[in-house]
Image (cartoon, grey):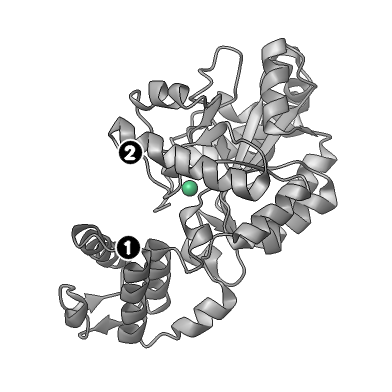
Amino acid sequence: MLVEIRRATLRVLQTSGVSRLVADSRWRRQRLLILCYHGVSRQDEHLWRPNLYMKPDFLRQRLEMLQRGKYNVLPLGKALELLRAGELPPRSVVITFDDGMCDFYSCAYPLLKSCGFPVTVYQTTYYSDYQRPVFNLICSYMLWKRRGTVLNNGGELGLRQPLDLRTEASREEIVLQLMSRAEADHLNGADRDALAVRLASALGFDYQELLRNRLLHVMSPSEISELALAGVDFQLHAHRHRTPMDEASFRREIQENRQRLQSMTNSEAVHFCYPSGEYCSDFLPWLKAESVVSATTCNPGLVTTRTHPLLLPRFVDTSARSAIEFEGWLAGVGPLLAFKRYVPAGR
Ligand SMILES: [Zn+2]
């Protein structure tokens, strides 16, 4: 109901010309909108995780809206400098992609390139070096592909029986059991992948086919190098996509991520994005000590000169967001209406 009222209000603001007035206002000119994207489907990933994946055509339509509305899409670092100097151009927007999955290379980047839009990729690097599917994602995906069934052959994987794959909650519970087991047994990437192979076998799933398609893989070092040369901005997202609560481990995540990116891109990453949007105040001095100059969250909002540079809000765009909602956010009227905090599902 609230969503409908919100959409109706945005529609009225748009048709009455108020949205355009706000978009061109001095108020909006003092604000920066940072867009957040995750993945673009190569197959049916948007049906599995609509909060993370969208169809290529959906992204193309979003980029066309940016072009039609004459939005100024800026590189992240440049936009933050201009904001601080009070020199942002009208209707400023930054585009960011989290994780750096290989669908960015094959699906998203060609679309961005054809529009001439700059983009920042917050790149996690462990699974870039280790070219296998991301463990928790591939387990979740395979269970989803077998949704609607109940299996009794999960005992050998140490899972509670039976494996009820009929609801999202029960499938998520199985993923949590697998992840807890991997943590408790200190499994490395290869061991986790072996566990995923055994899960595939229990589900009657062709794992080799997934590998051939590179489904749910992170971009390889050579893909990252190639895109960096072409002008894509790669920034920090933690080496293992996690934010440990002790300073040494947290900072090691940043250091390893930065070192790996440096070797692939030949430049030093100084912007960070909190994995899964999770952050706490303890992280701020640790990021400062690592000379990180900005950090983005998944909290909705526009950036102003008063925003803490290590707590920059973003608009997380998903398949569930309507065109009217998206355009409302571009113009600047979207944030004026109440929105819930976005909680990414599983990544
Ligand atoms: Zn992420």
* Disc 1 C-beta below 8 A from ligand 1: no
Tell me the quarter of the picture where residue 180 sits.
Answer: bottom left
Task: Indicate the secondary structure of the residue bearing disc 1.
Answer: loop
Q: Position of residue 93 (x, y in %)?
A: 71, 32
Q: Of residues 90 and 80, which is closer to you in this image?
A: 80
Along the line of sight, which residue is nearer the eye, 14 or 127? 127
Q: Earlier in the sequence, mark 2 or mark 1?
A: 1
Name which quarter of the figure residue 39 lies in.
bottom right
Q: Amino acid at mark 1?
A: Asn
Q: Residue at x 72, y 45 (%)?
A: 232
Q: Position of residue 297 (x, y in %)?
A: 48, 33
Residue 143 lies, with reference to residue 291, above or below; the image says below
Residue at figure coordinates x 52%, y 34% from the top left: 272
| Residue under pointer 1 | 188
* Position of residue 264 in the picture relative to residue 237 (left or right): right
Crowding at dot 2, Cα within 10 Å, few <14 / some 14-19 / many 20+, comes out as: few
Query: Ligand 1 near label 2 (Cβ, under 8 Å)?
Result: no
Residue type beneath disc 2: Ser
Q: Is residue 194 visible?
A: yes
Q: Is residue 132 left or right of residue 86?
A: left
Res 111 → quadrant = bottom right
Q: Is residue 122 visible?
A: no
**Residue drawn 17% across the image and 74% down it:** 158
In-image side of 121 versus 126 (left or right): right
Point out residue 108 in the picture as x, y percentages from the top left corner.
69, 56
- Residue 341 in picture, x, y percent from top left: 43, 35
Q: State the residue at coordinates (47%, 68%).
A: 133
Badge 2 marks a residue whose secondary structure is helix
86 is higher (above) or lower (below) than 254 = above
Residue to which mark 2 is pinned? 249
Above or below 45: residue 327: above
